[in-house]
Image (cartoon, helix red, strand yellow):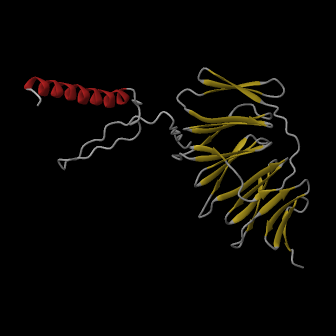
Amino acid sequence: MFSWQHSKLIIKVLTVIIGFSIVIGIIPSLFANPNQFDGDMYYMDTVGQNRSRPPQRPHPDLHVPTVPAKPDITVFSNEPTDKTAYPYIQTTINFVEGHLSYKAFLSDGTEISYSTRGEHVRYSKCFGDLCIIVSQKNLLGVSNSSTEWEKGHIFGEERYQVAMGHKAALVASDRKLYLYNSYTNHWDTISLEQETLSGFANLYDKVAIITTRRMLVIDLPSEVQFEENLLLRRIYQFEMRDGFINFYSGSKLWMFRHQTETFEEVDLTD
């Protein structure tokens, strides 16, 4: 028969064994990955009140790209396919941005300065024989035939598309087209009435403009405009050449001849 001393000894041994087992079970958790709960953590509102969610720390392996703000001036891209074979175009004019000014340097070495004091320049570029600047107040253009920067006024329009040609540049808003002519150093305004711009091209002294309602051909030296109604058709492809401009609309072709300065309609199914 066991004595009371023996019982107490057995109880002590069992207590030591149980305590040792608990310690063995806790030790691995002390060395576990401390970041195993990284990522999104959600909190439940147990009292039925709207609480602001605390800032979340993203997972270190998760890359969330920032979305840039959409610019208010974009480079225009033709909707119809432009098949024009453009020659190599050398930019023969340049400008330098100074303190509150732009200085244009023409091909003959002439320097023409424009003060931008009080204006915020939103777009500027030189290409071919011309340079343009778009500010919040004005449109500015200069070319190798200029004696000063030519100013065109804009009124309360915020969004623009810009297209550059060798001899002409286009600044298009939702309501109007502003065309800079390097031959005459002049801004011409074309109103858009229930139509939108879909194509623009400039080859030598001719400009082709396509909208959802009409085709325009402009002779830059004379500033004469020639127009043809699309009659609810759509231009899918166009091509500018030395002597003519072709506008394709499915089975129909409109050809503008430079020599006669007229549009000729051709049925391609014959």
Q: Identify the residue shown where x is 88% and y is 40%.
A: 88
Residue 57 % position (x, y): 40, 34
Residue 187 at x, y = what percent?
68, 44
The correct choice, above or below, for 243 with respect to 57 in the image is: below
Which sits in the foreground, 194 or 76?
76
Judged left or right of residue 99, residue 266 is right
In the rendered image, residue 248, in percent from the top left (x then y), is placed at 81, 66
Indicate whether 254 appears above or below 32: below
Q: Is residue 48 above or below residue 59?
A: below
Q: Quadrant of residue 72?
A: top right
Q: Residue at x 67, y 66 (%)?
A: 213
- Taking the view exactly as shown, the residue that stands out farthest to the bottom is 270
Q: How many marks?
A: 0
- Quadrant for the C terminus in the image: bottom right
* Image-based side of 86 in relation to 49, left or right: right
Compare residues 39 and 192 and report the one nearer the observer: 39
Residue 178, above or below 95: below
Residue 28 % position (x, y): 37, 29
Residue 227 in view (yes/no):
yes
Of 121 and 234, nearer the camera is 234
Residue 192, quarter of picture: bottom right
**Residue positioned most to the top:** 99
**What residue lies at 59% left-to-right and 38% top-to-bottom?**
138
